[in-house]
Amino acid sequence: MQLWYYEDYEDGVKLGLAAKEVLFRDKSDFQTVDVIETEAYGRMLLLDGLVMTTDKDEFVYHELISHVPALNHKKPERVVVIGGGDGGTVRELLKHPEIKEIVLCEIDGMVVEVCEKYFPEIAKGIRDPRVKLNIGDGIAYMAEHEANSLDLVVVDSTDPIGPGEGLFSGAFYNSVAKALKSDGLMVCQSEGLWHPPAVLQRIHKNVSAGFAHVYPYIASIPTYPKGTWSWTMASKNAIDVKKFDKARLKKIEATNLKYLNEDLMTGVFALPNFFKAKLKF
């Protein structure tokens, strides 16, 4: 009998993937954690039954959330990643030799352990000497962080439900802004283009509570709800996304980037009209 995984998008649409076997299933103090071997996308990580990453398309998400902010900063040295327990964001950030320290603050230690075992190519950077692993609450970590001390904060969170809900609040973005230097950048995943306007506007409004300038950008990820996803980069002072560091990008492209290139570094900021209307952007 064929094994299938379904993610219900609650509006008459489901994602269905044929699966070979369930490799891991358990419940942590925060959420259920599953690893499934799928026919089309290889291994797939689920948290509370929702797709987080797969072997085949993870590079899109991790390249977009990492390199876009890093290349729009003149010299990122100190970075905090909130969430991101699969390690993919850290793996990509480590491709920037300018970065001296990455604190990976993940609330669920089980996610890190599972990903190191079942997704070694994604998680391989977690034990790098430049990475400090902090298993704990990212909201509390940022609230207590030294002011004006960070160059980048990458909020690689789950959806705004369960353990990830507080990572989308105005209070959290304010604490992130306080911890960043004047030229620091924040980026967060900001849900799919087809999400309800109220959800997208709430995220956009709360990011704006901490930052004067916001820069939404998008890309296609086939295993995420309805195939397209968004991120939002934010800064205290205005930046020109056309003036990213092209020389650094060329060096990083040599590390086998699968998605980003010079054209897409600006192209991802081109938003369709219906999405801008939802954001009221």
Image (cartoon, rainbow, N blue to C red):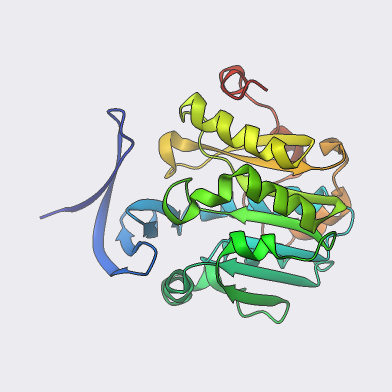
Q: Position of residue 191 (x, y in %)?
A: 52, 39
Rendered residue at 37%/69% (across/down):
29
Q: Is residue 107 left or right of residue 15?
A: right
Rendered residue at 63%/33% (across/down):
204
Q: Position of residue 68 (x, y in %)?
A: 73, 48
Image vertical order of residue 12 relative to residue 5, above or below: above
Q: Nearer the viewer, residue 177 or 171?
A: 171
Q: Is residue 134 left or right of residue 52?
A: right
Q: Nearer the viewer, residue 68 or 197?
A: 197
Quarter-of-image position of residue 261: top right
Q: In this view of the protein, can residue 172 be seen by the observer? A: yes
Q: Nearer the viewer, residue 155 or 206?
A: 206
Q: Is residue 200 left or right of residue 15?
A: right
Q: Position of residue 130 (x, y in %)?
A: 73, 77
Q: Is residue 177 left or right of residue 109?
A: right
Q: Quadrant of the N terminus?
A: bottom left
Q: Quadrant of the C terminus?
A: top right
Rendered residue at 65%/47% (across/down):
171
Q: Nearer the viewer, residue 99 or 135?
A: 135
